[in-house]
């Protein structure tokens, strides 16, 4: 057994739920049917990709969808289909997975990294507005951790400057913004089915969109430059084979029937974590000062009248359903971050350190990218910790373990 932080028994010894969860009967049946049909590719007349696409479009409140190999390629295809390419700039948030920006590079455009809101950590509308130049062609709001970006504010910036909006919905299957499903709130939305996501086929992605012409253009990018009604070997424009397989779609389609229940479970777990965090006392060694504030960081949180050392990162305004891909925790007291991560692991409650600011990643500093000042993303990279999705599938006892381990480690 691993020793806990003070050499005692770890707070949590039982394993956390694994991800993906075990196959259910509906998945087993559909995957078997597809395997036995021999129609494994999406161009062989099978219906799994088409059904998955239609279901996702419906759930996103739009008429069109295209299933693709992964969300990185989906973002690329959406940008290309919307006419974004060399010479253009695309604004992306500074606190996101690297693919949001590398998809822009793949499209031949320049990612421009704008800061996030200091409280909710989603792309800031004011930072976006400030980053617009005559070359800006699009913005990519990310529905980070499962909660929707403030789309009304971001769409207003886009409308003022005539920009396309591609929602990065990789982490937010099933989330809603002001009662409307995400994915269908911009010109295109892109979901991921990579292994860590709320629905997974190991890999996979899906683009949804509202406009018929945009759908035709994105479809062509994903289908080697063909047109929907053109000759098989016509290829009037340049495109690639970015298609999902029928086998992957067969794993995903039945998942839609249990997605809402799983989201509800994670939300209940998140609420339990929030309650438990409120009971963590300020570390005795703590002298009452909060983390040294840098511009853009939030004031220490209070729960009731007590200053809380750790709180949940709040959701952006307009969040009506968070799909809880992960739970972001914010630390409000000075602490050695790497000790905290190591000690939490030793307590059987492994947390994730989260993203470094996008603009500091070598992949982007060495590429054709531009980073605006991003103090809020820098603060997040120092102060924010993640509880990963599989842990959110645990029973409420898991929420108590998270808080108990944090209290123990902060007091060490
Ligand atoms: C915010 C975000 N965007 C894009 C991606 C890329 O998705 P994929 O791995 O399907 O290419 C991911 C996850 O992997 C992500 O978390």
Image (cartoon, grey):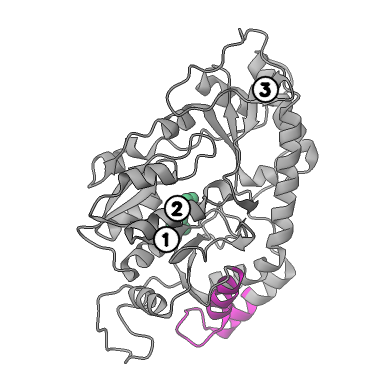
| Whether residue 5 is visible | no
Disc 3 + disc 2, Cβ < 8 Å: no
Between discs 3 and 2, the one toward the N terminus: 2
- Can you tell which quarter of the image residue 93 is in? top left
For this view, does 316 lie left or right of residue 110?
Answer: right
- Residue segment shown in magenta: 31-59
Q: Residue at x 44, y 57 (%)?
A: 155
Residue plotted at (37% across, 40% down) = 358
Majority SS type along the magenta span: helix
- Ligand 1 contact, mark 1 (Cβ < 8 Å): no
Reply above or below: 157 against 234.
above
Q: Residue at x 49, y 44 (%)?
A: 122
Magenta includes 46?
yes
Residue 182: x and y in percent read: 56, 60
Instruction: Report, in whole angstroms, how far the alpha carbon at label 2 lies from the one at label 1.
Output: 11 Å
Coordinates of residue 226 in the picture (x, y in percent)? 32, 83
- Quadrant where the N terminus is found in the figure: top right
| Nearer to us in this view, 271 or 315 | 315
Residue tagged by mark 1? 166
Q: Is residue 153 above or below residue 210?
A: above
Q: Is residue 47 visible?
A: yes
CB atoms of marks 3 and 1 within 8 Å: no
Distance between mark 3 and mark 1 Cα atoms: 37 Å
User: Where does residue 388 sit, x and y in percent of width and height?
Assistant: 60, 42
Mark 2 sits on what residue?
A: 154
Local SS, label 1: strand
Q: Is residue 383 left or right of residue 98?
A: right
Compare marks 2 and 1 and give the one earlier in the sequence: 2
> Would you name the residue on which mark 3 appears?
308
- Count up the numbered dots: 3
């Amino acid at each position: 057994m691993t020793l806990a932080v003070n050499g005692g028994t770890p707070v949590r010894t039982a394993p956390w739920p694994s991800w993906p969860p075990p196959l259910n009967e509906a998945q087993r049946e559909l995957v078997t049917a597809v395997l036995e049909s021999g129609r494994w590719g999406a161009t062989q007349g099978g219906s799994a990709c088409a059904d998955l696409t239609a279901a996702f479009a419906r759930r996103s409140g739009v008429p069109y969808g295209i299933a693709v190999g992964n969300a990185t390629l989906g973002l690329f295809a959406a940008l290309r289909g919307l006419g974004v390419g060399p010479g253009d700039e695309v604004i992306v948030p500074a606190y996101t997975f690297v693919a949001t920006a590398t998809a822009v590079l793949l499209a031949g455009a320049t990612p421009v990294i704008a800061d996030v809101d200091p409280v909710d950590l989603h792309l800031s509308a004011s930072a976006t507005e400030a980053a617009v130049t005559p070359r800006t062609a699009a913005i990519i709001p990310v529905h980070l951790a499962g909660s929707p970006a403030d789309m009304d504010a971001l769409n207003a910036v886009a409308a003022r400057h005539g920009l396309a909006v591609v929602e990065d919905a990789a982490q937010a299957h099933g989330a809603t913004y002001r009662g409307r499903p995400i994915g269908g709130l911009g010109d295109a939305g892109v979901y991921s089915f990579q292994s860590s996501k709320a629905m997974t086929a190991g890999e996979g992605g899906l683009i949804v969109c509202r406009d018929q012409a945009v759908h035709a253009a994105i479809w062509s990018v994903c289908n080697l430059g063909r047109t929907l009604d053109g000759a098989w070997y016509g290829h009037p424009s340049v495109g690639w084979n970015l298609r999902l397989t029928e086998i992957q779609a067969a794993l995903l389609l039945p998942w839609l029937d249990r997605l809402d229940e799983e989201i509800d479970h994670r939300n209940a777990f998140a609420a339990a974590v929030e309650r438990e965090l409120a009971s963590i006392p300020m570390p005795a060694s703590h002298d009452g000062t909060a983390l040294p504030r840098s511009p853009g960081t939030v004031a220490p949180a209070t729960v009731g009248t007590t200053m809380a050392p750790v709180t949940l990162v709040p959701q952006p305004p307009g969040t009506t359903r968070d799909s809880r891909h992960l739970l972001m925790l914010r630390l409000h007291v000075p602490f050695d971050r790497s000790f905290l991560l190591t000690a939490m692991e030793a307590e059987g409650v492994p947390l994730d350190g989260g993203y470094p600011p996008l603009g500091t990643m070598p992949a982007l500093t060495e590429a054709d990218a531009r980073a605006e000042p991003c103090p809020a993303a820098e603060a997040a990279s120092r102060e924010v910790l993640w509880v990963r999705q599989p842990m959110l599938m645990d029973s409420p006892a898991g929420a108590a373990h998270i808080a108990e381990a944090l209290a123990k480690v902060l007091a060490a």
